[in-house]
Image: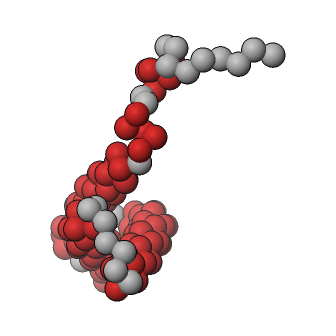
Amino acid sequence: MEITFNTPALVFPAISLLLLAYTNRYLALANLIRKLHDEYMRGERNHLLLKQIKILRVRINLVRQMQTLGVFSFLCCVVTMYGVYKQWTSLNSYVFAASLLSLLASLIISLLEISQSTKALEWELSDMEELEKSSFFSDLWGGKEKKDD
């Protein structure tokens, strides 16, 4: 397969959008950590705080890894384009493959981070009293009486 300028250029917008999404995830985590820190300093500690801290530590590391691999993928695309300019045909294939593999790894880590985020949200939801008392199925099949018009 011959790699032209267009080949790595097609990946540029995807990587840029992913890096933007990763940065947004990072900023959301940073805000959440600051909020939890303020609550902790005010003495507002609940039983979920330690679980939240552990999962936030894992998530922030996953986002860092996602960003690192995304930037590496972007750099490999730039090197590939330079290699096309310099006509380094054999090197281009390997560098572009490294770009695609690091992009793939970044997406897999992103999936893991989303899984961790979902787990944290499930802990929050399970802590709410209303959700423990009822479930979707009990509400659906007669758990609550209907009001007549």
Residue shown at the point (31%, 72%) measured from the top left: 45
Residue shown at the point (31%, 51%) measured from the top left: 123
Instruction: Give the camera-side residue of 75 and 64.
Output: 64
In the image, farthest residue toward the right: 149
Instruction: Give the camera-side residue of 96 and 71.
Output: 71
Q: What is the quadrant of residue 25 in the picture?
A: bottom left
Instruction: Give the camera-side residue of 47 and 73.
Output: 47
Location of residue 77 in the rendering, given as x and y in whole percent from the top left corner: 34, 73
Location of residue 142 in the rendering, given as x and y in whole percent from the top left corner: 52, 14
Q: In what quadrant of the picture does the N terminus appear?
A: bottom left
Res 26 visible: no
Residue shown at the point (26%, 62%) measured from the top left: 47
Badge count: 0
Q: In the displayed structure, would residue 114 be above or below residue 82?
A: above
Q: What is the quadrant of residue 79 in the picture?
A: bottom left
Location of residue 76 in the rendering, given as x and y in whole percent from the top left corner: 28, 75
Location of residue 93 in the rendering, given as x and y in whole percent from the top left corner: 22, 65
Res 128 visible: yes
Q: In the displayed structure, would residue 87 be above or below residue 148?
A: below
